[in-house]
Amino acid sequence: MKRLNGGYTSYFNIRNNRSGALFQGRFKSVHVDSNEYLLYLSAYINKNYVVHQLGGSTPKLVGSWSSWEEYGSDPLKRAGICEKSMILEQFKDISTYKKFVDDVVDNIATRRQEEKVIAHLVIE
């Protein structure tokens, strides 16, 4: 990660006539220790742009930059860089996986809203 970030930072700085760090803080990794967590991460990563409400009125455009385009299309299509079989083989079909992903995103949104309400109540 250090080499990747360093190379990209150099490229970005030269291209934009600037200097300094682009990314702040250390890269953090978490051990995926269960299949349930693997599936959750797959959903989160694929629809990260929805979870973080990126793209404003054009979330589809932002979504086209994510791995969701690979997962959401024909599962037998091998275009792209993702190894999808480990995830998709666990679902009856692509529509079942899409529903799972949407449910995970909805649960994350609900939990975040509840956390905001609780934080507001604690402050009061």
Image: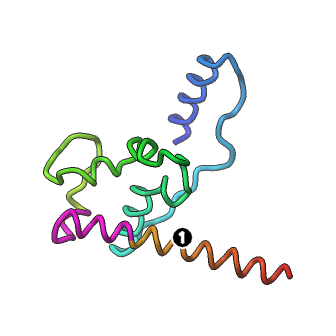
Residue drawn at 29 percent across, 64 percent down: 98
In the image, is residue 95 part of the stretch drawn in magenta? yes
Identify whether 98 is placed above or below 79.
below
Which SS class for mark 1?
helix
- Of all residues shown, which one is farthest toward the front? 57
Q: Position of residue 37 (x, y in %)?
A: 40, 72
**Mark 1 is on which residue type?**
Ala
Residue drawn at 54 percent across, 70 percent down: 109
**Image-based side of 113 in relation to 78, left or right:** right
- Of all residues shown, which one is farthest toward the right? 124
Who is closer to the viewer here, 85 or 34?
85
Who is closer to the viewer here, 86 or 77?
77
**Image-based side of 20 in relation to 86, left or right:** right
Residue drawn at 56 percent across, 57 percent down: 52
Q: Which residue is mark 1?
A: 109
Locate the C terminus and report the quarter of the image it occupies: bottom right
In the image, is residue 67 part of the stretch drawn in magenta? no
Magenta segment main secondary structure? helix
How is the rendered protein coloured?
rainbow
- Of all residues shown, which one is farthest toward the left? 76
Q: Position of residue 2 (x, y in %)?
A: 56, 39
Say few, some or many: other residues with alpha carbon within 10 Å of mark 1 (under 14 / 14 to 19 / 20 or more).
some
Residue drawn at 52 percent across, 34 percent down: 3
Tell me which segment is drawn in magenta.
87-102
Identify whether 35 is placed above or below 83.
below
Q: Position of residue 23 (x, y in %)?
A: 65, 40
Q: Position of residue 94 (x, y in %)?
A: 21, 62
Residue 111, located in which quarter of the rendered image? bottom right
**Image-based side of 91 in relation to 99, left or right:** left
